[in-house]
Amino acid sequence: MNCVTQITFNLNILLTFGKLFRLMEMIRIFWESILGTLNWTLNSILFQLPWYKNYFWGLILISILAWGLEITFPWRKKQGLFRKDFWLDGFYMFFNFFLFSIVISGFYEVLQFMFSEVGLTSKSLVLFDLSTLPETIQLIVFFIILDFVQWVTHILLHKIPILWQFHKIHHSVKEMGFAAHLRYHWMENLLYKPLKTFGVMILGGFEPDQAYIIHFIAITIGHLNHSNIKLSWGPLKYLLNNPIMHLHHHAFEIPKGKIGVNFGISLSVWDYLFKTNHIPNTDGDLKLGFPGDENLPNNFFKQLHYGFKKTNR
Ligand SMILES: [Zn+2]
Ligand SMILES: [Zn+2]
């Protein structure tokens, strides 16, 4: 073996070791993140976390409150307490919020590792540096930016046909109730999470210490938006999303030529600003769903792989 061949051979061995080391590092990050999230979820269930950071029992409490409001002040009086797909949606709530987030946390950490390798860090896209602002302002700006990013994401789910295939699961709700909030295909987690991170990156990778307040407010508004209660927030309706507005987002019939209306998540202001608002009436007895929704599988396991097959829009 001559000198040049020997050097090339050694370099190849080094490169192979480098690749192997990188792969092992990624596997380590993946598992550590999954175990961390699993641990965090178990601690929540066992009350080992401060009550104000306990998403597990927090979600249950918010659900009981929303259900209590539906029972006490029902908008659609004929709708049963255990409406169509009540249990399916209840299961989705825990699946999307906990089970799936345990798995996705691993992928998410690996993705961040790969981004950092190409020099893209949380400081690369800073538009607003939150850290210098008072805590309350930090929380408000954080809430607004994140909500806007999610509003854009939601429009993409309606606009891009392959994404709409997955979003159909959320729109397959035929009788609306609070738990329908978290009936969505697991692929939506894959889309929302990186875009949410993009929102955080705009803020310099900064998530305020008390961001859990914002997350709980967002979950509560989301639950209310899907509840069977006639709540408009009065003059605040131009700012806050509400059950009336969101019910029309789920309407079977949408205005001609539009891909959808009322895309708001927590805030309605983006729809009013960008003229995607539409509330033709406040009856509550709307036909929900979308053309062709009868072809959608009605059980969770079949819905898991729905959207990957080529179907018509
Ligand atoms: Zn939608
Ligand atoms: Zn919805």
Image (tube, rainbow, N blue to C red):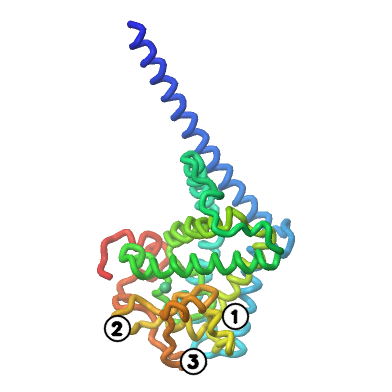
Q: Which residue is mark 1?
A: 67
Judge depth for marks 3 and 2 and give the one in front: 2
Tell me if 154 is positioned left or right of 197 in this view. left
Check contact, mark 2 vs mark 1: CB within 8 A: no
Percent x, y of residue 225: 53, 79
Mark pair 1, 3: CA separation? 15 Å
Ligand 1: image quarter: bottom left
Tag 3: amino acid? Lys
Locate residue 277: give its quadrant. bottom left
Q: Say which residue appears at 54% left-offset and 58% top-offset.
A: 127
The residue tagged 3 is 78
Residue 124: x percent and y percent?
Answer: 52, 49
The correct choice, above or below, for 40 with respect to 30 in the image is: below
Q: Look at label 1 and name its amino acid.
A: Trp
Q: At 47% from the left edge and 42% from the top edge, which residue is drawn?
A: 114
Earlier residue among tags 2 and 1: 1
Alpha-carbon neighbours of circle 1 within 10 Å: few (<14), some, or many (≥20)? Answer: many
Q: Secondary structure at mark 2?
A: loop
Give the residue type at disc 2: Lys
